[in-house]
């Protein structure tokens, strides 16, 4: 009897071990089957200290396509998305809207919700001096009672001593998707980039765009806030390499990658390592964690 019980126990243990090994194999396969997506480094949260004055110009990636710039105490955000995005995320946001003490301006490149986040802009309304964008996005911001200004491509305006000029962009993807057209013919000038001149150098925020001939003929910037993906509505990978190599010494602060959990969606699944493998002077590809400070300095040509 005892021997029978022992045999029974041995058989049961063997059965369960096989089962658990099989289960492990199944789950391992599931893990390896999920397509790899490059992910931003862990967020470095920041607070009030990031808004104080200094003699420097500090750039912080906010995750997604967002950046904050503090230049000698003048503070602005470009395309901040700090809450309520409608897709799953891979990142934590580095600051909550309620922790932002003051912004001299928010600049919005275009109306897509990964750039113009209405919930973020409304939350920041009481601490933001003014909002700037294209004429079209301005019309949307006015609907939200934001203190906004609309500009044409090539227009210049000042945020205190910082000079900002709108650069051209080509991102009229809606015209190819009737369900996204919203009853209008989308125009190139609905979207823009920003050329930002600070005492410590020039920053070019390209905005989302297909590669345009104009993009290859700019003066040399000291940092590019670089829309990076392999999407036909963006620069594409080949276009990104071309743009990067047009300014071979300029640091490239990549965005639009590593933030949204979308391994099969080209606009969000770029891998910076691929760009590093292809561009001239790959050490200038800057992989920031959301919230990590980057100090701007003039490059030597
Ligand atoms: Zn975008």
Image (cartoon, helix red, strand yellow):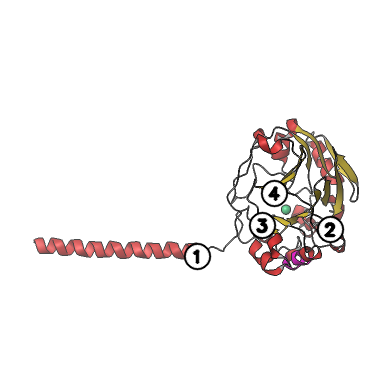
Label 4: which secondary element:
strand
Q: Provide the residue designation for mark 3.
A: 268
**Could you tell me residue 165's position as x and y percent?**
87, 48
Is residue 114 among what the camera can see? no
Task: Say above or below: 102 vs 186.
Answer: above
**For mark 3, does the 10 Å Cα neighbourhood hold few (<14), some (14 to 19), or many (20 or more) residues?**
many
Tell me the residue at 67%/65% (across/down): 276
Task: Say above or below: 286 vs 118.
Answer: below
Between the C-alphas of marks 3 and 4, the distance is 22 Å
- Residues drawn in magenta: 237-242
Is label 3 within 8 A of ligand 1 (CB to nearest ligand atom)? Answer: no
Between the C-alphas of marks 2 and 3, the distance is 27 Å
Between the C-alphas of marks 2 and 1, the distance is 42 Å
> Is tag 4's residue or tag 1's residue first in the polypeptide sequence?
1
> Is tag 3's residue or tag 4's residue first in the polypeptide sequence?
3
- Residue 177 is inside the magenta segment: no
Foreground disc of the pair 2, 1:
2
Q: Which quarter shows the C terminus?
A: bottom right
Q: Are marks 2 and 3 in contact (CB under 8 Å)?
A: no
> Is tag 3's residue or tag 1's residue first in the polypeptide sequence?
1
Q: Provide the residue designation for mark 4.
A: 294
Q: Say which mark, if any, is on residue 32.
A: 1
**For mark 2, does the 10 Å Cα neighbourhood hold few (<14), some (14 to 19), or many (20 or more) residues?**
some
Between the C-alphas of marks 2 and 4, the distance is 19 Å
Q: Are marks 3 and 4 in contact (CB under 8 Å)?
A: no
Residue 243 occupies quadrant: bottom right
């Amino acid at each position: 009897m005892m021997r029978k019980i022992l045999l029974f126990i041995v058989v049961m243990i063997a059965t369960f071990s096989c089962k658990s090994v099989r289960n492990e194999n199944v789950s391992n396969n599931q893990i390896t089957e999920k397509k790899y997506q490059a992910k931003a480094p862990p967020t470095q949260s920041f607070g009030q200290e990031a808004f104080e004055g200094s003699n420097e110009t500090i750039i912080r990636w906010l995750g997604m396509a967002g950046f904050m710039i503090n230049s000698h105490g003048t503070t602005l955000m470009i395309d901040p998305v700090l809450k309520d995005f409608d897709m799953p995320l891979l990142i934590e946001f580095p600051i909550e809207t309620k922790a932002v003490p003051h912004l001299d301006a928010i600049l919005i490149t275009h109306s897509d919700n990964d750039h113009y986040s209405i919930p973020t802009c409304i939350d920041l309304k009481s601490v933001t001096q003014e909002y700037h964008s294209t004429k079209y996005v301005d019309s949307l911001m006015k609907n939200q009672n934001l203190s906004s200004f609309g500009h044409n491509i090539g227009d210049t305006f000042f945020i205190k001593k910082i000079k900002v000029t709108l650069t051209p962009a080509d991102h009229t993807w809606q015209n190819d998707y009737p369900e996204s057209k919203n009853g209008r013919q989308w125009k190139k000038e609905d979207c823009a980039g920003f050329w930002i001149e600070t005492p410590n150098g020039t920053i070019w925020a390209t905005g989302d765009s297909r590669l345009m001939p104009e993009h290859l003929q700019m003066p040399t910037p000291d940092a590019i806030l670089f829309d990076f993906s392999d999407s036909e509505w963006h620069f594409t990978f080949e276009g990104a390499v071309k743009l990067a190599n047009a300014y071979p010494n300029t640091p490239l602060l990549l965005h639009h990658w590593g933030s949204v959990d979308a391994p099969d969606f080209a606009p969000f699944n770029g891998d910076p390592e691929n760009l590093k493998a292809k561009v001239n002077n790959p050490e200038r590809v800057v992989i920031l964690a959301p919230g990590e400070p980057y100090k701007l300095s003039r490059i030597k040509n």
